[in-house]
């Protein structure tokens, strides 16, 4: 059977020859006694044994994984541990019991991440995530994965985190399993990134860029869960400054905006909105949100019937925060927002000479993005006012930018403006004519004609 497709049920049906292992001294008589009481017993009986003697069972399982390499046995013990922790994740605290202070409880799982088949890798990863999340946050040395007085080096928490994060990133780059590699990695990260030390390790491993491609609208239940957990990872990283720097320069905001526009799943919308709320005061994120039309999207989301109070509060806070951000934006930011929305009007900045002198070089950003949008408005808008203002603004760019005529000519503006010289609206034809004059005659001569 393909080990990648092994199920827990299939593994736990096996009969493991524990007596043989005792005969060969791979497990002790005490270990055999513990196993006989535990193995193949009902859940309630095993739960009682773990309550009474949990650290002894953890010690036994870790010892077996350390000393026995037969694949069927390793899979079986991992399945027992996985079953025990999935039934009650707080049992992961047993791995940090003081009686195990001299045991290297992390090592077998970390080793099996790279040595085992997919069943072994997957279970080792999930178990490690549970154990790490349950570790004491301060106190004795063992909380940091170190055992005092031990004769051999013990796997430290730093070793574990670096090894686990490296494996998780590898699953996102080139999964060991075609359909389960990435989901298991994201699922573990959505738990582990609550830890500041994991955030640091993940960013150092260049892991943030591996999340961005997974942020895209989802339809199936499985893909929605993957999307939710990916967005949860981004939200957790939005509390960590070095990760925020990468998020600002990638397409994260655009992708999150597409998700929130199209998703009807409340938990997905909530985690994206909470991420936006975190990022709003940071760097250029506020301006990015305005550029992406988020104020309009938030207004639309508020009209929907959400049941989650946290989401409703976050929407209100984000709406107010964006209003404040728009008020504080520079004059060019406001102009840019107007152009990107595609509805132009004769507000003062269009005709202010100071605005154009101070901001004309800003039009060069993102390969003349705003100039290109103005030209798109000429092609697509049916609003005469927007067409007239767009023609005027292009003519202003020609007048105030040192290479204005060349740039506008290269962008094939002449043909688009010429079409508007026969427009039925007089305001459009007047500004189209001015634009063509400045384009063909040069700014100074065209200004003289206008005067």
Image: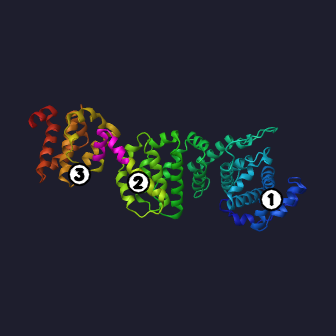
Mark seen at residue 316: 2
Give the x, y percent position of residue 434: 14, 41
Q: Which residue is mark 1?
A: 52
Q: Which residues are magenta?
A: 322-339
User: Could you say which quadrant of the image residue 46 lies in?
Assistant: bottom right
Mark 3 vs mark 2: give the one in front. Answer: 2
Relative to 254, does residue 442 appear above or below in the rendering?
above
Mark 3 vs mark 1: give the one in front. Answer: 1
Sequence-wise first label, 2 or 1? 1
Does the stretch in magenta take in 427? no
Colouring style: rainbow
Q: CA distance from mark 3 to mark 1?
A: 76 Å
Mark seen at residue 379: 3
Q: CA distance from mark 3 to mark 2?
A: 36 Å
- Residues at badges 2 and 1 in contact (C-beta under 8 Å)? no
Does the stretch in magenta take in 327? yes
Q: In the depicted view, which residue is nearer to us: 312 or 377? A: 312
């Amino acid at each position: 059977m393909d080990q990648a497709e092994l199920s827990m049920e299939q593994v736990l049906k096996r009969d493991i020859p524990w007596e043989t292992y005792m005969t060969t001294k791979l497990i002790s008589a005490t270990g055999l006694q513990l196993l006989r009481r535990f193995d193949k017993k009902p859940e309630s009986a095993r739960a009682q044994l773990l309550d009474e003697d949990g650290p002894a069972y953890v010690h036994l399982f870790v010892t077996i994984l350390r000393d026995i390499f037969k694949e069927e046995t390793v899979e079986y013990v991992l399945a027992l541990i996985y079953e025990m922790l999935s039934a009650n994740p707080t049992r992961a605290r047993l791995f940090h019991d003081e009686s195990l202070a001299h045991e290297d409880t992390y090592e077998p799982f970390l080793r099996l991440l790279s040595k085992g088949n997919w069943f072994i890798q997957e279970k080792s990863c999930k178990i490690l995530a549970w154990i790490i999340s349950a570790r004491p946050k301060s106190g004795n040395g063992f909380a940091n994965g170190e055992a005092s007085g031990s004769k051999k080096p013990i796997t430290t928490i730093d070793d574990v985190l670096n090894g686990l994060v490296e494996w998780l990133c590898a699953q996102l780059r080139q999964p060991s399993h075609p359909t389960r590699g990435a989901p298991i990695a994201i699922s573990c990260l959505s738990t582990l990134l609550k830890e500041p030390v994991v955030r640091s390790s993940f960013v150092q491993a260049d892991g943030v860029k591996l999340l961005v491609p997974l942020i895209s609208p989802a339809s199936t239940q499985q893909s929605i869960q993957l999307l939710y957990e990916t967005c949860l990872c981004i939200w957790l990283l939005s509390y960590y400054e070095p990760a925020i720097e990468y998020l600002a320069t990638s397409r994260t905001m655009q992708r999150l905006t597409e998700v929130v526009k199209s998703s009807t799943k409340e938990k997905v919308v909530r985690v994206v909105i909470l991420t936006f709320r975190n990022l709003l005061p940071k760097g250029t994120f506020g301006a990015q949100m305005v550029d992406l039309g988020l104020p309009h999207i938030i207004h639309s989301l508020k009209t929907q019937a959400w049941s989650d109070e946290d989401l409703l509060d976050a929407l209100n806070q984000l709406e107010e925060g964006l209003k404040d951000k728009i008020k504080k934006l520079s004059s060019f930011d406001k102009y840019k927002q107007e152009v990107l929305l595609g509805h132009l009007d004769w507000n003062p900045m269009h005709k202010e000479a100071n605005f154009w002198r101070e901001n004309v070089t800003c039009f060069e950003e993102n390969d003349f993005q705003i100039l290109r949008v103005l030209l798109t408005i000429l092609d697509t808008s049916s609003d005469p006012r927007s067409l007239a203002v767009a023609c005027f603004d292009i003519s202003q760019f020609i007048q105030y930018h040192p290479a204005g005529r060349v740039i506008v000519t290269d962008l094939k503006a002449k043909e688009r403006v010429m079409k508007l010289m026969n427009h039925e609206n007089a305001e459009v034809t007047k500004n189209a004519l001015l634009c063509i004059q400045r384009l063909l005659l040069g700014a100074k001569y065209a200004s003289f004609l206008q005067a």
